[in-house]
Image (tube, grey):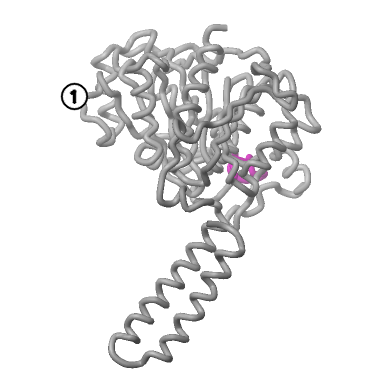
Amino acid sequence: MTGIPLLILLGLLALAVPVLTMRYRRGAGPVITIVGAQLAAVALTAALANDYGDFYPKWHDLFGSVHVGMDTPTLSFGGPTGTATPRSGPAKRRDHAPAPSALDPAAASALAQSLHPTNWAKASEWTERGAVVNLPITGDGGGPAQDVLAYLPPQWFAGGAEAAALPMVEVLTGYPGTPHTVIDKLHAPDVLLQDIDAGTAHPMVLVITRPVEPFPRDTECVDVPNGPSTFSYLATALPTAAASILHLHPSALGAMGYSTGGYCALKLAMMRPQEFSAGASMSGYYRALPEANSGNLFGANQVTGREQNDLDWRLTHLPAPSASVMIATSHDERYDDGYAAAQSFLSLVHSPMSATEMVLPHGGHNFGTWTAEFPRLLSWMDQRLQSATSR
């Protein structure tokens, strides 16, 4: 569904149909050809957008869905040597301010009610399903409130010390994105709850937001000189504020996301490894990719700014961090967030950093692919957080 041949075919079709309109001028002919011309133009526009974004590389991706059970992914570990087990540096638990006072069950429910819960679950279901709530967190420097959701698992509503120590994971959307897509399309709370109930994952709190701040400026998870400190906001201000609101002292912290959110999750794990125990990316890229509304992201020193936000450059020119990351992609994906870019990044990984790769035979830059990948990434994230918690 991508490439020049399809675009040429649709372009010729878009030109040919109006010509037929001039030929058939009687009866239903004009109406049929005019409708056909409109459909041809829409098809050409959609194909151009799809070719640019690589959303649906193959017809299978558009009309079907990606099933990991059928399209078995390739999983590999380590860096360029392809060792059988991940190389990893020491994972350290977070050591911030003293833990806030733990809530009792009644106080937990009252707090959740005050945070404007969504309709994902009824209040009567919270102790069994958990809840999705809105977090009143302002932007960098006290700017406008950001769109932040949190999934609170049933164990959070039990209150007590164990609830206060639950791990926390930032889930970052693509751009422009909205946190609600993580609930409605990625089905992140449903997947996590199913794994918790099955005993294949431990309870954790998901904090869901965009990787840009202030929205709608596409700040690309960058600390902009004399501008918004988006990276620092996501690395420090957001998890600190979320933990304070929810009365948490997380035992471990992770980040995961798709597209721009995947790039940001890798940055958080690589540039703040003492705080983020793991970072997982689905169709993410490896350097800041400013758009028309990004503005000047790097200040006066453009070269240095681009280099510092280029993960390939950091692995080549700076000491490798003690970070643990996972990359999910497919053989069909192209461009800066595709398969070749992932291989280039992974070839640079070396100790004490560790990397796990997940490769689907087919897939694209879309929720069908990410929905298939997410359960594996969540399982991997759970393992990394538990490893960090036990140290």
Q: Position of residue 180 (x, y in %)?
A: 37, 41
173 or 30: nearer the eye? Answer: 30
In this picture, residue 340 sits left or right of residue 358 = right
In this picture, residue 238 sits left or right of residue 27 = right
User: Farthest residue toward the front?
Assistant: 70
Quadrant hosting residue 178? top left
Q: Position of residue 24 (x, y in %)?
A: 38, 90
Residue shown at the point (35%, 40%) measured from the top left: 184
Residue shown at the point (51%, 31%) measured from the top left: 72
Above or below: residue 381 compared with residue 257: above
Residue labelled with disc 1: 124
SS state under label 1: helix
Q: Which residues are magenta?
A: 220-229
Tell whether position 224 is magenta: yes
Residue shown at the point (55%, 52%) measured from the top left: 54
Magenta stretch: dominant secondary structure: loop
Residue 138 seen by the camera:
no
Quadrant hosting residue 160? top left
Tell whether position 42 is magenta: no
Quadrant holding the C terminus: top right
In this picture, residue 306 sits left or right of residue 196 = right
